[in-house]
Structures are given as C-alpha cells and as structure tokens.
Image (spheres, rainbow, N blue to C red):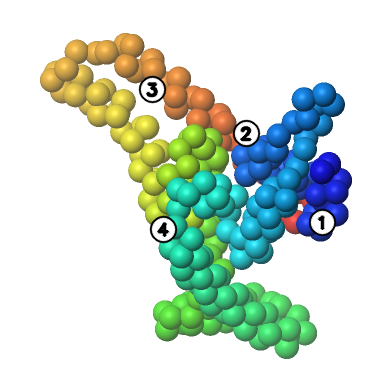
C-alpha cells in the first residue's frame, strides 16, 4: 500500500510517517519497478505501536530501542510511569500557584515576594513545582542530540532526568578538565607540553562550544517566532 493509504489507516499525516522512516522506526520496501515505498500490514501495526508509545510521552529514541528488542517494554513503561507521576506532581504545584494568583487584581513587588516565599515553603514541605533550569536543560538536550546520538543505549539513559544531567555535566567537565590538567602538570614541571593533544582538545571544545551557542540561538529564534518566549 502507498504512504497516503497508511496515513489514512493510522490517522497520521504523510510527513509524520516519513519522519518515523527517517528515525529508523519504519523500513518499508520499495517496489522494484516504480521505486515507490510499499507498506505492509506489519508496517501499519508498527506505526500503531509507535503511536501508543508516543501517546505515553515515550521518546522516539526509546521507541527505536523497544521496536528493535534493545529495551524491555515493562522496564520502559515503569520508568515512564514514574516520570509521568513526577510531571503530574510538578503540574499540580504549578496549577495551585496559578489558582492563588488568579485571585489577585494586580501584582506588585510585595505580592511577588509573598508568592515566591510561598513556593519556597511549599517546596521545602515536598510539593513539586516546574523546575527553572533552562540553561541546564538546553545543555542536556544538546549533549544528547549531538554528542551521543550515535549510541542508542546512552540515549536511553537520558530518559532519566538526573542521569541525563549527570552524563551531560561529566561530559562537559571532562572536555575541559583533561587539557586543563595537562597544562597544570606542564606548569608544575611534571610533563612536557603536548601541542598535538592540546590542539585536538581545542578543536573539540571549539566545535561543541560553537555548536551549543548556535543551538541556543536557533532555539531562541524558534521560540520568538512561535510566540512562546
């Protein structure tokens, strides 16, 4: 069957189906004569599996591992359930805060301080609110997409927020610490200066550093254009 028929059967649009193909989730065969993609009932079933997983908020990278037998469905679902519960708790705190602030006619500096103090007290008592970690989240997302995109197993670990942050922080610290430690050893007279080593790390740092800056600029531009800033 053709891609338009698959889209009709699954409720997706054609671009969604092609997106899943690019991500390696679908591998339809091509007709030898026409060169068109020829989808099967198994492909339709696979798309429906993908849709179910996506409806639960599971990432495309994790779905790839699930569909290829590289991850256990029960483990992934249990982990996703815990993550969703945490999101629910965060949203509940944010929702309660919205309800309180809707009672105000206007917001002056004193009331801002009152509400911020309210948030701090509630957080100390265990209530969850949305985290304000935009820079760290950008670092985590960039590290996953551009430093470890080639390693699905590591990408799977990025589904756990605290692991994702730890991996990202260690990655960037090591990138800076290795050449810094060498320069320190040279300064202390313990090693000879290794120009080649420093050149390699300088290139790596420059590539990832400029890449991250460009990533943040592109993200900021997208948010501004979509009115989400």
Classed neighbour count for the residue bearing mark 3: other residues with Cα under 10 Å, few (<14), some (14–19), many (≥20) = some
Q: Nearer the viewer, mark 3 or mark 1?
A: 1
Helix, strand or loop at disc 4? Answer: helix
Residue indicated by mark 3: 201
Q: Nearer the viewer, mark 2 or mark 1?
A: 1
Q: Nearer the viewer, mark 3 or mark 4?
A: 4
In the picture, which quadrant includes the N terminus?
A: top right
Residue indicated by mark 1: 9
Residue 104 position by quadrant: bottom right
Residue indicated by mark 4: 162
Q: 225 or 42, which is in the foreground?
A: 42
Cα–Cα span, label 4 and label 2: 25 Å
Indicate which disc, 3 or 4, sits on the residue closer to the N terminus: 4
Q: Is residue 162 above or below residue 127?
A: above
Q: Relative to residue 192, is residue 157 drawn left or right?
A: right
Q: Relative to residue 224, is residue 109 drawn left or right?
A: left
Q: Residue furthest bottom?
A: 103
Indicate which disc, 4 or 2, sits on the residue closer to the N terminus: 4
Residue indicated by mark 2: 214
Q: Relative to residue 181, is residue 81 drawn left or right?
A: right
Which residue is pictured at 45% across the width and 48% down the height?
Answer: 70
Which residue is pictured at 48% across the width and 55% down the height?
Answer: 159
Mark 3 touches mark 2? (CB < 8 Å): no
Indicate which disc, 3 or 1, sits on the residue closer to the N terminus: 1
Helix, strand or loop at disc 3? Answer: helix
């Amino acid at each position: 069957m053709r891609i338009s028929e698959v889209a009709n059967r699954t409720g997706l649009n054609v671009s969604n189906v092609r997106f899943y193909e690019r991500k390696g989730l679908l591998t339809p065969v091509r007709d030898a004569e026409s060169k068109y993609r020829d989808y099967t009932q198994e492909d339709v079933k696979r798309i429906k599996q993908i849709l179910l997983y996506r409806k639960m908020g599971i990432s495309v990278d994790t779905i790839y591992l699930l569909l290829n037998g590289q991850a256990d469905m029960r483990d992934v679902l249990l982990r996703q359930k815990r993550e969703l519960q945490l999101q629910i708790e965060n949203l509940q705190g944010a929702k309660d805060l919205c309800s309180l602030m809707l009672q105000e006619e206007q917001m002056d500096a004193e009331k801002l301080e009152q509400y911020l103090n309210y948030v701090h007290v509630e957080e100390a008592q265990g209530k969850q609110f949305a985290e304000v970690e935009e820079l760290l989240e950008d670092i985590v997302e960039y590290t996953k997409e551009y430093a470890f995109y080639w390693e699905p197993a590591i990408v799977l670990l990025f589904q756990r927020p605290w692991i994702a942050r730890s991996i990202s922080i260690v990655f960037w610290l090591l990138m800076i610490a290795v050449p810094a430690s060498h320069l320190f050893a040279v300064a202390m007279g313990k090693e000879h200066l290794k120009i080649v080593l420093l050149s390699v790390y300088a290139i790596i740092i420059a590539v990832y550093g400029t890449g991250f800056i460009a990533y943040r600029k592109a993200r900021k531009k997208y948010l501004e254009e979509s009115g989400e800033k």
